[in-house]
Each structure stands twice: as structure tokens, then as C-alpha cells.
Image (spheres, rainbow, N blue to C red):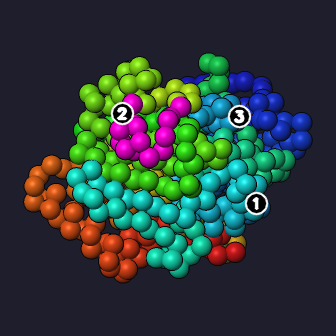
Amino acid sequence: MVPQQSSTTSLAAEATHTHPFANSFTGSSVSSVSSVASPNELNPSLDYDVAIAGAGIVGLTLACALQDSGLRIALIDAKPATAGLQQHRAYALTLMTGRIFSGLNLWSQIVPQITTFRQIRLADEHSSAVVNLQPADLGTDALGYVGEHRVLVKALLDALQGAAAITWLCPAEVVQVNFQAESAVLTLSTDGEQQQLRTRLLVAADGSRSLIRQQAGIGTHGWQYWQSCVTAVIRPQKPHGDIAREHFWASGPFATLPLPENRCQIVLTAPHAEAQHWLQVDEAAFLHELNRRYDGQLGDLELLGKRTLFPVQLMQSDRYILPRLALVGDAAHCCHPVGGQGLNLGIRDAAALAQVIWQAHQQGDDIGDAKILRRYERWRKLENLTILGFTDLLDRCFSSQWLPLVVVRRLGLRMMRHLPPLKFLALRLMTGLGGRPPELAQR
Ligand SMILES: Cc1cc2nc3c(=O)[nH]c(=O)nc-3n(C[C@H](O)[C@H](O)[C@H](O)COP(=O)(O)OP(=O)(O)OC[C@H]3O[C@@H](n4cnc5c(N)ncnc54)[C@H](O)[C@@H]3O)c2cc1C
């Protein structure tokens, strides 16, 4: 543990000024954060029941799900709370994510600002066999949604506005964690000033490079892909028709996600050097390549904003829990972006963990006890691994030029066209309806 300078100012009190709704914020636990020199000097009464480190979409979803549980919650992020409103990114959202957001009463705000797609078009560069998946294949009225980061963050922040149970500690970076029998002690740093807080349960929602996971000594398994992704937003001349397209090229999958105002988020996966090339070529050459891939079917294309490059990895944490600790979202697992699953898995983690914590709290159990937290791990670890495996298989299978595999996948696509049970199974996985639903999704 790093020795600390005592300070008379509580981080929580400062943090209320950084929250977008600071004026209406009336957090009752504002004065409860101790500024202390070492864990030994902490007041024996716990400061928080749950500390959520990472206020990305997954951390915010968990806070939202727990805000009426009667638990005292600290929400911590290295960035200001409003940073997410500036992030230009869009995600494919599954039907299950829609149900969870609906259970959180966010859906009516979100749905007018996103696209609902009722068709998924799968195509292989080397085959004329296009597979069109429709709601009738699944017995639902839609197949998924595409929403922008800022839209989701805004709805979550609005829902948390004035939540008395939540103390915002943003910006504050978690720099050290110490686990004790009854609590976890976090050292937070803001503008060089360090302070500590203590919590019965720490939830790491701090992304794929989770410092908390590393400090807890939880190992991971997985690999970096040989590919990177270039993302961009375009506006085609012709209507995108609310169709989600996943086209498999030898270099990697190429996804087109329909956004409102006839915009599309594209995710072009290619080996690192080729991805770098598509990041750096001039706009005309990039759009020419996209047009070639669409076979001109979307008409002239306009590039809106900058292209961004992301490395891609598959990662599964060896454990999702330890006494006093639970990992959620990218802190626990990462998958290939093909099929747009990563954030959706994290949102399901948040809903599942909230349910486990809430029930334990109602029964008077210790929410940080590993016995309780294991219910969450058993629920989510295998389900996530299934999706990690599914996305890996899709990418490997469809990015290969090996003739036997090319033949098998052509056959697979043709079979999928004519075998409704195969379509149904693939859609159950892709829409998130295949796993155990959290109670939130059934309201
Ligand atoms: C190219 C690409 C396309 C993708 N497309 C999709 C898609 O279509 N659909 C989908 O479901 N998923 C998609 N994903 C995956 C998705 O982006 C991630 O799964 C998701 O963003 C993870 O959310 P998170 O909240 O767990 O983590 P993050 O969004 O990484 O949030 C972590 C938060 O923790 C904070 N933090 C980190 N360290 C600390 C610290 N020490 N102290 C305090 N705060 C800290 C950060 O500031 C951040 O706010 C895609 C990924 C890539 C790369």
C-alpha cells in the first residue's frame, strides 16, 4: 500500500462538481469518504457497499441496476462523467440488451435515436450464396439495433441523475487496491492528490487492461488477433434499408451497421498492415475500396468524420470473482468484433451481477463473500466463453483461404439458407436470447 498524505477534502465532495447534474445531485453519502493515510487508519465503518471502478457503459448499467437496492454505491472513473457523451462510436446491440435497457426504463429514451434492424445479410466474398436472416427465422419482430455510444451514455446518465445512493468520483483514477477480509481499500488519484476509500465489494468495470484485475493477480487466457479493425461512419447515396451486413472477406469480416439519418458504421477487419493501409490512404481511395466491396449497391459514399484503428483480441479472465471483487465487461473478457457482441456481453454481466448482489442484500448476506459472488461467475463465465468461441470460429472460418475450409463454409452458408433450425440456433446466439436471462430482461 502506498503511504498517503491525509487531506481534509473528500473526493466525493469534489466529484459532485464534475457530475453533469451536479446542481441536482444530492448524494447522501457525499461526506462518507474518508481521506486517510493507510488502511489501518480507516474508520471501521465501511464507506461504501459497492464501488464500481469504470463508468463506461457497463459500469453505468450496473450502477443504474443497483441504484434502488438500498446499497451505498461509489462510481469511479479516471475521466469526467460526461466524457462518454463525446465518444464517436456505434455498436450493434442485441435483443437481450434492448430487454435489459427496457427493464431499466431507459428504452423509451433510447429507441427513437437508434436503428432497429429486421434483416441481417451474410455474404462470403467467394460465394454467391447470400443468407438473409429475418425476424420470422427467430419468431421475433426485430433482429437487433445499432446505437451510438453517446446516446446510451446520455440515457444512463439521465437515469442516474439525482440518485441519492450514488456518489460520483469522476475524474479519479484507481491506482492501487488492497484486499482485506471484510473490505477492499482503493487508492484514488485526482490531479496528483491521493485518497482512499473502502468498500464491501469492488466491481472492476475498468476495461480490457483492467489494473484491478492485474493487482488482484487474476490471470487471463487468449491471444491478439493477426488483424486490426478500421471503423468509420459513412453516408451512402442510396438508403441502407435498415439492413445489418456482415460480409466475409479473405482478409477478415467487413460489417456495415445501419444508423439513423441514413448513416452506417463500418467495421473493416484486415491483417495489421492492410488495416494500417486503409487507415492511411486518402479518403477517395478508401471510399473506392468500400464501394468495390458493396459492388456499387449503396451508390456514392460520403465519409463522415475520421477513421479509427483498433487492435483485436480474445481474452477470458481465469476468474471473474475473488472475495470482495467481481469483474464485468471488458475487464473480464474481450472478443473479436465480428457479430458485435463485446459490449452486449458486458451489459448482461452487469444485469446478472446486479441481480446476484440485490438478492444477497435482501437476504442479509454479505455481498462481497466469494460464495455469493460465485453465483455470478457460474452464470456468466461459460455463457461468455461460448460467444468468445463462436466469434473466433466465425473469424477463423471465414478469413481462411484454405480450400477445404472454403468448401465447408460455402456448404455451411447454403445449408443455412435452407435449414431453418440452423438459422434459429445462430440467431439465438447472436441476439443474446440463448442464455439465461436476467430478471431485469423479463419485466
Ligand atoms: C472495432 C470494435 C468494434 C466493436 N463493435 C461492437 C459492437 O458492435 N457491439 C458490441 O457489443 N461491442 C462491440 N465492441 C466491443 C465494445 O467496444 C467493448 O466490449 C465495450 O466498449 C466494453 O465496455 P466496458 O464498459 O467494459 O469498458 P470500457 O468502455 O473500456 O470502459 C472502461 C472505463 O473504465 C475507466 N478506467 C479504466 N481504468 C481505470 C482506472 N484505473 N481508474 C478509474 N477508471 C478507469 C475508463 O476511463 C473507461 O471509462 C467493439 C470493439 C471494437 C474494438
The label nearer to you, 3 versus 1, is 1
Q: Position of residue 85 (x, y in %)?
A: 68, 36
**Amino acid identity at mark 3:** Thr
Q: Nearer the viewer, residue 292 or 211?
A: 292
Q: Identify the amino acid type marked 1.
A: Ser
Q: Is residue 204 left or right of residue 170?
A: left
Is mark 3 in CB contact (under 8 Å) with mark 1? no
| Image coordinates for residue 341, horizontal then vertical, percent | 45, 55
What separation in Å lies between label 3 and label 1 (alpha carbons)?
21 Å
- CB under 8 Å between callouts 3 and 2? no
Magenta-colored stretch includes residue 381: no
Element carrying mark 3: helix
Disc 3 designates what residue?
A: 82
How far is mark 3 from mark 2, CA to CA? 36 Å
* Label 3 or label 2, whichever comes before in sequence order: 3
Q: Which mark is residue 292?
A: none
Q: Which residues are magenta?
A: 288-302
Q: Amino acid at mark 2?
A: Glu
Is tag 3's residue or tag 1's residue first in the polypeptide sequence?
Answer: 3
Residue at x 33%, y 72% (from the top left corner):
417
Location of residue 412 in the rendering, given as x and y in whole percent from the top left corner: 24, 68
The residue identified by callout 2 is 289
Q: Which residue is mark 1?
A: 108
